[in-house]
Amino acid sequence: MIALHLPGSLLRGAERLAGLGSAVQGRVLSAAMGLPESVQRRIVGSPVEVDGQTLATDTQLMLWLQKLAREPALPTLPLSEAREALEQQARLIGGDPWIGSTRDLTVADLPARLYVPSGSTGEGDPLLVFFHGGGFIYGSLASHDAPCRVLAEGAGVRVLSVDYRLAPESRFPGPCEDAVAAFAWVRAHAAELGADPERLGVGGDSAGGNLAAGVALEVTTECAFQLLIYPVTSADHDTRSARVFGQGYFLTSEFIQVATEGYLTAEADRADPRLALLEAKVPDGVAPAYVATAGFDPLRDEGEAYAERLREAGVRVELRRFEDQIHGFLNVTGLGRTSPAAVAELVQALRAGLG
């Protein structure tokens, strides 16, 4: 019945979503996400309200269209196909944001991409070392190209996205070691990157947020700022948000389980503070942090618990919960209104923290 409220052309496109190519799906999604909020509300019906939060209407519509398309869940696909599917999803929702320039390079033997904003001075710029999300088993430079463009151009900060090794090819602690090595390389080669070694930050989303936080704990005063976007901070995910939002909001309990099993080498790894950040000792001198969580995200509570953990240790922390958003909103830079607006706040936080 909900579909009957769709405008005719959009309805016909939506009904044929399943099995159609990504280009057609992208056009239908773009058209739907560009509709007025009042029309979107008529399409999806009653608001989704949980924990005193209301899911953004455009996000609710995006989830509905995703369900209508009947795309297989990533954990059900062979690993290589799932990785490709994630990149395809990212292209659909990311758009093609403007950036001054980009350059691919190798950092500590890892592929990387440098994003230089239009207003760059050419030397001595602040720089954010960025680690992508994807549960430690998915994700790439391509999957997070759009948000890195938006962060760099909007904040006036160089962003260096690092393609760390993924599990299960490189299980824990391989990605952690890659992240620390990449930051050390950047600090040693800051001049080559046009960066100020005293204004280097780390950032990342989800699994990448875990890696970024781990780097900040390891290097302390060598890092000037950390941007942690719905970070993984536990291997057990024993929280209310994990139980309440484990189905229906993009990131699922099944995805988390598959990713965790693919990442860990041994059961004892669950308690290792490089993964279980809530158990980590917070040394003196750790960089100020901006921690962003999403209201409808299984990782919400553990991210907020880590912000409190840092605060209790004397770290300057700004915690921002985007109540109407889901896990993955960082990648939605090319569709709708509410996710791009949330990303715009992250841009301002990065500008304030490093710029």
Image (tube, grey):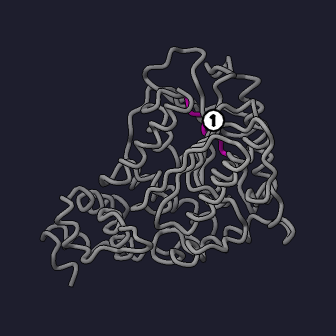
Q: Is residue 163 left or right of residue 43?
A: right
On the image, the x and y values in percent for residue 28 come to 26, 63
* Picture quadrant where residue 243 is located: bottom right
Question: Quick check: 326 left or right of 43?
Answer: right
Q: Which residue is mark 1?
A: 225
For the N terminus, the image quarter is bottom left
- Position of residue 146 relative to residue 303, above or below, is above
The range drawn in magenta is 158-163
Q: Position of residue 162 (x, y in %)?
A: 65, 41
Residue in front for this viewpoint, 221 or 101: 221
Looking at the magenta stretch, what is its main secondary structure?
strand
Q: Secondary structure at mark 1?
A: strand
- Relative vertical location of residue 72 with respect to residue 139 in this rendering, above or below: below
The crowding category of the residue bearing disc 1, from other C-alpha atoms within 10 Å (few below 14, some 14 to 19, many at least 20), is many
- Residue at the outermost left position: 8
Q: Quadrant of residue 230?
A: bottom right
Judge by depth and name the residue closer to the eye, 277 or 191: 277
